[in-house]
Image: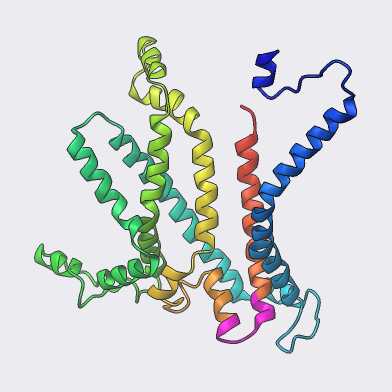
């Protein structure tokens, strides 16, 4: 009986009415609701209300007259908006692929037996970019891409390579250059999460696989990947949402240029709202961006919950 009470199972006393036990449960439930009420209020004020307000203004024009779904029809027929969707997807796919791949490789490297001082030094160097704000990261990479101030073209010329170091000014390479900066900035977070997941895998599983004759690649395929499946999908979801709404680094580096080749949906919505003051159309772009993220997130959550 004491064990049942220890795990939270209510004990019925002799002669105690069941409605009294139900009353106790309702009181506990009410207490739990009071504890989560501040969080729910914060979520409603900071997330739900702004979303509803953006949807409301997306139904009006510049003069705040109700036009229904006119802004959404306009967006779906706007070649410039479709270009921002394409470029946002390219930015997200490149960033997520690099984050997961490089993060996993670095996590595997740091998970190997090595000198403690060397391991600590490597972790500090890899984690350094994550301690810098995105605006400072954008300024750093603008200097690195500058053909007159950067040390990189000087090094390339010193080894006999004559290349034009104008990545941010080249419409063909500007989006890739911005993506590289984002990868460098966010990579430490994904590496840290994967390293924590790797260290949670019991060593006994690797020992059993080795006894069964599995080599390193097979141990990685049949032991490491299955145990990291959930964290990999979660990180992909997190990366997709984070990169899809990425704004500050891209805006400081290029402001959508050159020739609009780095214009993403987030920067496009900002431009329409605060440069052209077309808040209705900007709201429609933001709502469409939300639905794209929602569909992708639901797909990843389906993979996360699907039973093997």
Residue at left offset 20%, top offset 76%:
149
267 and 217: which is toward the camera = 267
Of residues 6 and 157, the one drawn nearer to the viewer in this rendering: 6
Q: Residue at x 69, y 25 (%)?
A: 8
In the rendered image, the quadrant that contains the N terminus is top right
Q: Position of residue 52 (x, y in %)?
A: 73, 67
The answer to whether 90 is drawn above or below residue 145 in the figure is: above
Residue at the image position 46 percent from the left and 76 percent from the top: 256
Q: Position of 162 compared to 10: left or right?
A: left
Verify whether residue 12 appears in magenta. no
Classified by dominant secondary structure, the portion drawn in magenta counts as helix
Total marks placed? 0
**Horizontal and vertical percent for residue 143?**
26, 73
Where, by quadrant of the figure, is residue 276 drawn? bottom right
Q: State whether residue 284 is above or below residue 120.
A: below
Read off the magenta span: 273-282
Quadrant including the C terminus: top right
Does residue 193 appear to the left or right of 22 in the view shown? Answer: left
Query: Does the stretch in magenta take in 279?
Result: yes
Q: In the rendered view, does 153 fall on the left or right side of 174?
A: left
């Amino acid at each position: 009986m004491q064990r049942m009470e220890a795990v939270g199972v209510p004990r019925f006393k002799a002669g105690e009415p069941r409605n009294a036990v139900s009353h106790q449960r309702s009181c506990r439930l009410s207490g739990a609701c009071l504890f989560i009420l501040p969080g729910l209020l914060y979520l409603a004020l900071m997330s739900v209300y702004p979303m509803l307000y953006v949807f409301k203004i997306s139904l009006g024009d510049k003069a705040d007259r109700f036009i229904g779904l006119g802004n959404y029809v306009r967006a779906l027929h706007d070649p410039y908006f479709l270009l921002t969707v394409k470029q946002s997807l390219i930015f997200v796919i490149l960033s997520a692929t690099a984050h997961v791949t490089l993060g996993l490789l670095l996590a595997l490297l740091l998970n190997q037996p090595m000198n403690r001082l060397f391991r600590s030094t490597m972790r500090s160097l890899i984690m350094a970019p994550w301690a810098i704000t995105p605006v400072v990261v954008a300024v750093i990479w603008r200097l690195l891409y500058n053909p007159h101030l950067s040390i990189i073209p000087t090094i390339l010329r010193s080894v006999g390579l004559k290349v034009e170091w104008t990545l941010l000014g080249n419409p063909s390479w500007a989006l890739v250059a911005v993506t590289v900066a984002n990868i460098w900035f966010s990579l430490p977070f994904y590496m840290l999460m994967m390293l924590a997941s790797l260290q949670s895998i019991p060593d006994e599983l690797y020992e059993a696989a080795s006894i069964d004759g599995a080599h390193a690649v097979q141990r990685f395929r049949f032991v490491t990947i299955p145990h990291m499946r959930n964290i990999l999908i979660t990180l992909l979801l997190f990366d997709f949402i984070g990169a899809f709404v990425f704004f500050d680094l891209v805006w400081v580096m290029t402001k959508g240029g050159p020739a609009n080749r780095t214009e993403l949906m987030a920067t496009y919505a900002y431009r329409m709202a605060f440069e052209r003051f077309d808040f209705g159309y900007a709201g429609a772009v933001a709502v469409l961006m939300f639905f794209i993220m929602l569909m992708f997130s639901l797909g990843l959550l389906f993979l996360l919950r699907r039973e093997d």
